[in-house]
Image (cartoon, rainbow, N blue to C red):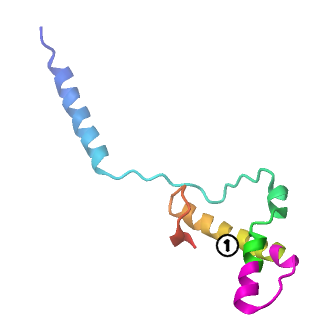
């Protein structure tokens, strides 16, 4: 004995699944949600390679570089990276790209 309503139901499921495949899937990430695990520890880290920066400034401009410069440049890098991360999250991505800067 064949049941017709099962076949009709299967056709509807096939139509629904093709509609879902045709539309692109996009995951939106909420940019206001932040996880600040060990935020204080990261705010103290030096993000700049001091020896390379000192060498660049010395060879290019003939100047010495104070150690305080590394702290300020690290702060600037944190702000710049935070802005770029927010840009990536607004676009619904979990990957930071150069276009975010």
The tally of labels here is 1
Viewer-nearest residue: 76 or 65 = 65
Would residue 39 be found to the left or right of residue 5 on screen? right
Residue drawn where x is 87% and y is 77% of the image? 68
On the image, the x and y values in percent for residue 90 come to 55, 64
Viewer-nearest residue: 55 or 2 = 55
What kind of secondary structure does the magenta stretch mostly adopt?
helix
Tell me if residue 35 comes above or below residue 61 in the rendering: above
Residue drawn where x is 62% and y is 60% of the image? 31
Q: Which residue is mark 1?
A: 80
Residue drawn where x is 39% and y is 50% of the image? 25
On the image, the x and y values in percent for residue 94 come to 55, 55
Tell me if residue 33 comes above or below residue 80 in the rendering: above
Quadrant location of the C terminus?
bottom right
Would residue 78 be found to the left or right of residue 13 on screen? right
Viewer-nearest residue: 61 or 27 = 61
Q: Which residues are magenta?
A: 55-70
Residue furthest toward the bottom? 61
On the image, the x and y values in percent for residue 97 come to 53, 65
Residue furthest toward the top? 1
Residue furthest toward the front? 59
Quarter location, residue 83 = bottom right
Residue furthest toward the left? 1
């Amino acid at each position: 004995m064949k049941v017709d309503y099962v076949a009709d139901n299967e056709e509807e499921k096939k139509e629904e699944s093709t509609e879902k495949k045709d539309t692109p899937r996009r995951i939106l990430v909420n940019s206001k949600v932040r996880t600040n695990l060990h935020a204080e520890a990261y705010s103290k880290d030096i993000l700049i390679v001091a020896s390379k920066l000192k060498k660049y400034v010395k060879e290019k401009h003939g100047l010495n570089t104070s150690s305080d410069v590394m702290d300020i440049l690290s702060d600037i890098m944190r702000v710049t990276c935070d802005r770029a991360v927010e840009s990536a999250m607004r676009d619904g991505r979990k990957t930071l790209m150069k276009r975010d800067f």
